[in-house]
Image (tube, coloured by chain):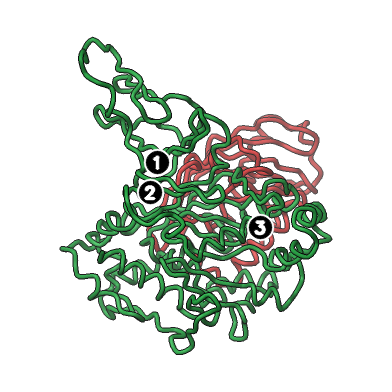
Chain colours: A green, B red
Amino acid sequence: MTETTALPRLDSLIEPARVHSRLYTDRAIFEEEMRRIWHRTWVYIGHESEVPNANDYVTKSIGPTPVLMVRDRQGEIRLLLNKCPHRGNQLCAYKQGNRATFTCPYHSWTFANTGELMGYALPDGYEGVSKTGVGLGKVARIGIYRGFVFGSMAAEGPTLMEHLGGARAALDQLCDNSPTGELELTAGFLQHRTKANWKFMLENETDGYHPGFVHASIFQVTKSGIANLYGKDSTALTRDYGNGHTEFDLRPEWRRLDTPLKWFGTSEERLPDYTAAMKAAYGDERARQIMIDGSPHTMIFPNLFIAEIQLFVLQPMAVDETIQHVTAVQFKGAPDINRRLRQQTMGSVGPAGLLLADDTEMYERNHRGALIHDPEWLVLSRGLHRERRDENGFRVAHSTDEVPQRGIWRHYLSLMQE
Amino acid sequence: MDPILAEKPVDLAALSPADLHHRVAQFLYLEARLQDTHAYDAWEQLWEDDAIYWVPANGHDTDPERQMSILYDNRSRIKVRVEQLKTGRRHTQTPRSELARLISNIEVVGVEGAEVSVRANVLIYEDNLRGETLWAARNEYRLRLVDGAFRLVRKKIGLVNNARPVFTLSFLV
């Protein structure tokens, strides 16, 4: 169920510590988000390692719009829109593959994987008609950082580096956990269909208040100490990087425990090959620090969530439907940790995940609740009195505080009003 | 224990095809009933120690040791999954899904010692807070005869739409 009305003034629905339920349920707002956020800012598309060879392609998305991420024959990454410019037919019907050209099944127009029209079928009907300017639509700008491919539908705007800002450090931290400094996302994605607005996911990814309750069942069964990270005495931090990027920073806890690979619930002894490769790559001291700090828990606005050992990509399909794409982080040159990363990922996330099925249950209940008109406003005031700035000037507070959610809405409002 | 299986030793190779098919079908119906009625302990006890409980994603011939699956449990993770359901705080199953499944097209593929390989189609109707969901799968089983009763060694649930986004799948499939 959705509501549709004329677009309201967004600043009447977003206050520093509370937001209006309508932001999650109004179809006009969703359409405006597509224009002002998804078709304008930098959106995460995919990872270079998903198209390792020349002419590889994989179908990705920007919101409901499919995007072909292609490595052309020269090795360059291209982002093409999956629509034949002749009569609008869906050009490629497959999720991935390897091909130098795409031929539309309708009238057999053929395009190079760079997007240019190569030829008309029965060309006598196009005498004197130029082929230039008839190519496939493209995502206007491509930005790549450490293998992470982002796209912006807007020809102009902030650079990817400007957009990432402080959150760039999270991508560095993630890659540092690889002995080669590189990821290889080769395990394929689970696709979890969710009847809820995408912003419930955006907000929850760095919410440190919920795990002790939503995930109590699995913490209880596995006798996990993880629940303490989300408790009153946790030294972990929530952080607002600005530009909508947020983080749940567990490093203070891991540094206090001072044990390599504790963050991943394992030890150097159990992963000897990985540990040796890390020490060879970074030296003993730096490798030890990386393995103590672990992998980040960072939500890069609007759709890339690094969940320590998983990468989630959020794809809004409609005001009340989102697909959560998720795969295991895989480090190039580290088979022993990769196996464990896959096993843990399959256990915890996706439609049957011991963790994410419960998060997703909350998202869907959130959405149904948001449709109820009274009370209209949702509360994001937790920890307002104890927000402070970290050494880099970013807002931080206690691990259970709603610093990230306030930061998300601050950026959201600025984008929606510009 | 359900009184559907012989308690005296049975030689699978000596059974007539009709008898074997009947025993296999009865076992699949038993498992279906335990799942539909959330009889978690009884269902968990069907599994052998070398169990593999597998719901592939992105096709039906993926390598679960290399690629992501929706579910890929060994015996100890099956136990964790069941224990979590039993806490009463597995929110996605609180309240529980209302379920009825139909099993059909049962084919005995082969017998090897005390083990029998089986294929069957299953259609599951689920109703929960989100609404109604229909699940369709082509299943593959390996059953082992232990003390006159079948046990589950391997169950592969091939959701026909596993390459597409699917809703939460938190009941026992």
> Mark 3, chain letter?
A
- Callout 2–callout 1 Cβ contact below 8 Å: yes
Residue A340 location (% of width, % of height): 71, 54
Look at label 1 and name its amino acid: Val
For mark 1, what is the residue?
A67
Circle 2 — which element?
strand
Residue nearest the viewer, comparing A186 with B40 = A186
> Mark 1, chain letter?
A
Q: Residue at x 65, y 66 (%)?
A: B83
Circle 3 — which element?
helix
Residue B158 location (% of width, % of height): 55, 41
Marks 3, 1 in one chain: yes
3 or 1: tag closer to the N-terminus: 1
Q: Residue at x 44, y 43 (%)?
A: A60
Q: Residues within 10 Å of mark 2 (few under 14, many from 20)?
A: many
Residue A290 location (% of width, % of height): 70, 64
Numbered disc total: 3
For mark 2, what is the residue?
A62
Look at label 3 and name its amino acid: Asp
- Above or below for A327 versus A298: above
For mark 3, what is the residue?
A176
- Above or below for A372 versus A163: below
Asked if residue A407 lies left or right of residue A415, the reply is right
Q: Residue at x 60, y 77 (%)?
A: A236
Asked if residue A403 lies left or right of residue B30, the reply is left
Q: Is residue A44 visible?
A: yes
Marks 2, 3 in one chain: yes
Q: Residue at x 40, y 70 (%)?
A: A408
Residue A371 location (% of width, % of height): 29, 69
